[in-house]
Image (spheres, rainbow, N blue to C red):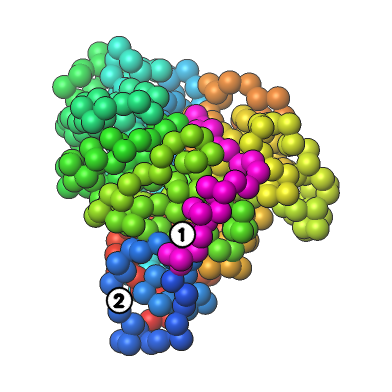
Amino acid sequence: MKRKILASALTCLFVIQSASIINAVSFKPEEKNRKQRCAINKGNPSQNPPADLAVKNTPQFVVFGFDDNRFSGLPGSGGNGGMRFVLDLFKGKKNPSGLGNSKTFDGSPIHFSMYTTSANIVTSLAAENPVYNKKVWHEALIAGNEIANHSHTHPSGLEYTESQWENEMVTWKSTVTKPFNSSESPLNPNEKFGIGLKNKSIKGFRTPNLEYNEATFKTLRKLGYAYDSSIEEGYQFEQDGTNFYWPYRLDWGSPGNQFTAPFVGLNPLPPQPGIWEIPGYTLIIPPDSECENYGVEPGLRDKFTDVTKYYMPDQGKLSGLDWSMFVLFKMNKKEAFATLKYTFDQHFKGNRTPMNLCMHSCIYSDKYMELPNITVQERQQVLTEFLDYVLSKEEVRVVSNAELLDWLRKPEGLKD
Ligand SMILES: [Zn+2]
């Protein structure tokens, strides 16, 4: 589920790439009040909050994006947890009340994004009876969460052509926009029915395995998608979680892609005008000096030295996926919670880049594979305790990426 990311020694090419990234940074001018500020965010890549917002006036967004969504967790489905757990976790929770401004989601119900693979609601392709998934996906939709495109069949698409991508994206759309029928019986699944998603609420895409190519983005633009959330940011050596790039438009290309592409032998993605990128950000394991503050033994970064040849203990970075923590790095509960909390704290004490997490609801299901160092209950506890922790901060707003995009286009401060 993870795209290989290289991080080895500095190369001449990297120095050139890095210089061009630094030139693209816009440094923050003096703080201005709302009327003085240009309220429109053009989306140029920046390590400062958009529209000249002062950091202390900027919401700390946290986005939980759940991919794939294979296991419903409903009675009769043969499993517990999964989507049922996610829906129950979010149910009834609200963002801090702030000043009551709906533009900054003050006091609004918290939401998540679901990057669904639509084969999971097709009888011949689904991992469990598709009627159960239709029911929980629809429940997520009517609760105000975002349903976004994660392809129809979850292919490995690095070599895909535009027509192959188009086929995946269009089939996804035609599958999920079929009407929802609450009385559809698991005993008699009917392909005429879907989850009732409306065309106008389709905004975002995340590519399977975070594997994209230029054809992915050309197709997204052709089909009118507003944003993508497939590119990773934060591997740049000088970035430590306090100074990641804010989400940007791809009119200027992608700093994260420009950094990582040479390491994996790919050409950087050419500019893709008009489409927003809401990147997935790396997670960062606490350094030795901070381990005690996060309830783990010093040496945690070194513990994972041999996990992948690309992992660098002095950086302590891994892809921002729960899969990376639990499956690839085989973290236990304490280690995963420490990593999430430390990464959040870096965002929050730094430039408040949105923390856009790439999660998988199936990892919180008892149908998921056995993992050596953490039970499904403990994985659920990590997510539950992390959500409680971020919601304890009055500047935090837990939103879907569709909601975050609305804010990015016209940013407002918490105290405006
Ligand atoms: Zn996936």
Toward the front, the furthest residue is 12
Viewer-closest of 187 and 117: 117
Label 1 Cα crowd, 10 Å radius (few <14 / some 14-19 / many 20+): few
- The image shows a total of numbered marks equal to 2
Callout 2–callout 1 Cβ contact below 8 Å: no
Q: Dividing the picture into quarters, in which one does residue 308 lie?
A: top right
Instruction: Give the magenta range.
Output: 1-25
**x and y percent of residue 196 in the render?**
20, 36
Residue occupying the point 82% across, 45% down: 299
Rounded to the nearest whole Å, what is the CA distance between mark 2 and mark 1?
27 Å
Q: Secondary structure at mark 2?
A: loop
Q: Is residue 316 left or right of residue 142?
A: right
Vertical order, 214 against 387 (above or below): above
Does any portion of residue 208 appear in the rendered image? yes
Mark 1 and ligand 1: say if the CB distance to the nearest ligand atom is below 8 Å. Answer: no
Is residue 22 in the magenta section? yes
Identify residue type, mark 2. Answer: Ala
- Residue on which the image places disc 2: 39
- Label 2: few (<14), some or many (≥20) within 10 Å? some
Q: Magenta includes 371? A: no
Residue under numbered circle 1: 20
Look at the picture and state if 392 lies above or below 17: below
Residue shown at 25%/16% (left/top)? 189
Residue 381 place in picture, x, y as percent: 63, 42
Where residue 72 appears, x then y in whole percent?
42, 28
Which is more N-terminal, label 1 or label 2?
1
Pair 2/1: label in front = 1
